[in-house]
Amino acid sequence: DAGVIQSPRHEVTEMGQEVTLRCKPISGHNSLFWYRQTMMRGLELLIYFNNNVPIDDSGMPEDRFSAKMPNASFSTLKIQPSEPRDSAVYFCASSLGTAGNQPQHFGDGTRLSIL
Amino acid sequence: QKEVEQNSGPLSVPEGAIASLNCTYSDRGSQSFFWYRQYSGKSPELIMSIYSNGDKEDGRFTAQLNKASQYVSLLIRDSQPSDSATYLCAVKTLARGKLIFGQGTELSVKP
């Protein structure tokens, strides 16, 4: 079975450019999560969706970050304009609902470098 | 106080020994607990989940949960060099549908 699919795997761009990260959740999963991981701050939840609706975006660092989920099989995380401090690994995860016993399954991540 | 706390390590154990990883959490409403393993440069991979007080065993892994003391642990028996990774503890409450992760403990198993 296909897992969570993220693209691109690596992204290097210059400060000020728009960055779009993409995620395809596991088929049938109705909850989707975007995380950012850095050495300093660890794994941080940015936003999550349930049935394509954003439920909690309290982790989104600022207005430069936005996320959408137009349908059950696709989500994007956009940074505009990007800054060097946005450099991190961004993970997408999905689960079958948000009930307590439903684990999250992670994609391979996008390693983002902002120069 | 962080919501989920782990010793950052690194924890170094010899091959064949038992590795003990600990995690404490602050929200008494927490109901589900997960251990993820993350190899360097890779994504987190679920290895254990536990929901009730006591022990849960899966192969060489045993998860232990004590809700009264608000801690959860992971024991790895007969540790192998391939177990060398960072282990992330994650906690979920019913009120919030999201996982809260600890900072992770780096485990190094020496041959």
Image (tube, rainbow, N blue to C red):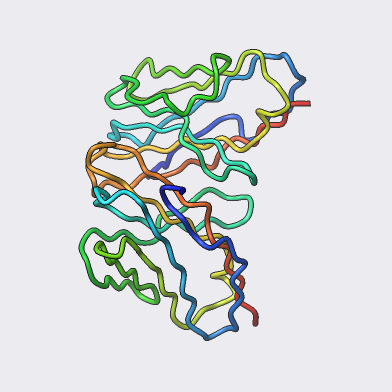
Instruction: Residue A32: give x, y in percent of width and height.
Output: 37, 31
Relative depth, front residue between A58 and A115: A58
Q: Quadrant of residue A79?
A: top right
Seen at 26% across and 73% down, the residue is B55
Instruction: Residue A109: give x, y in percent of width and height.
Output: 56, 39
Q: Is residue B33 above or below residue B53?
A: above
Seen at 58% across and 79% down, the residue is B13
Q: Residue furthest bottom?
A: B16
Q: Is residue A48 above or below residue B90?
A: above
Relative depth, front residue between B107 and B38: B107
Instruction: Residue A55: give x, y in percent of width and height.
Output: 32, 24
Say left or right for A46 vs B15: left
Q: Quadrant of the C terminus of chain A?
A: top right
Please state the total of marks drawn on the protein image.
0
Seen at 27% across and 50% down, the residue is B30
Seen at 64% across and 36% down, the residue is A88
Q: Quadrant of the N terminus of chain A?
A: top left
Q: Is residue B2 above or below residue B61?
A: above
Q: Quadrant of residue A47?
A: top left
Instruction: Residue B82: give x, y in percent of width and height.
Output: 57, 71
Q: Is residue A89 above or below residue B69?
A: above
